[in-house]
Image (cartoon, helix red, strand yellow):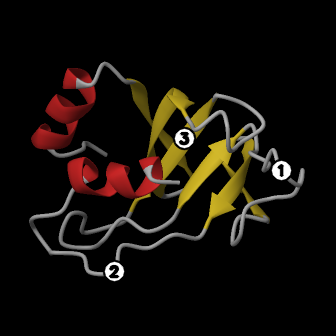
Amino acid sequence: MAILERDEQFLNEKAYQWCIVTGGTESAILLRDFAVTPHLYDRDKTDLLIRIPTGYNNAPLDMYFVDPPLRLKTTGGYPDRADHFENFAGRRWQRFSRHMSEWRAGLDCLRTYLPLIQRE
């Protein structure tokens, strides 16, 4: 599966290390060594996986996944709505159940979805 040209340009502009991975019939974007908030989590980077639904970008991106898992520094526990795991492309991923409040079909893309993740 190919991604949108504007997604590819965005990822390259931001100098992300990324690739497309597949698991069964699904495709996803994998961002390696994605920076996370080190004062909040037990590490400063993790691999980030975003599944690409059929019909994207009319169909919304929904949830994201990380490996290695992230735990909160304050409690050692998993973040709220991030305590489930799923297997994809030969790896076990921690699922963050996060959703954009309103997806604008045909307009929203990785450029508008990644800020949701980065706010975490």
Task: State the residue position of label 3.
Answer: 48
Q: Dot 2 lies on which element?
A: loop
Q: Position of residue 84 (x, y in %)?
A: 77, 66
Are discs 3 and 1 less than 8 Å apart at CB? no
Please report whichever mark, 2 or 3, sits nearer to the chain's N-terminal start: 3
Q: In the image, which is nearer the foreground, mark 3 or mark 1?
A: 1
**Residue 120 rendering spot, x and y as whole percentages:** 53, 54
Does label 3 or label 1 sit earlier along the sequence? 3
Answer yes or no: is residue 27 visible. Answer: no
Marking on residue 101: 2
The residue shown at (71%, 70%) is 80
Most extreme residue toward the bottom is 102
Q: Which residue is mark 1?
A: 74
Q: Identity of the amino acid at label 3?
A: Leu
Disc nearest the viewer among 2 and 3 = 2
Whichever of callouts 1 and 2 sits on the residue coming sooner in the sequence is 1
82 to 68, vertically: above or below: below
Q: Residues within 10 Å of mark 1 (few under 14, many from 20)?
A: few
Numbered disc total = 3
Using residue 70 as the reference point, say whether residue 116 is left or right of it.
left
Residue 16 in view (yes/no): yes
Which kind of residue does numbered mark 2 sit on?
Answer: Ser
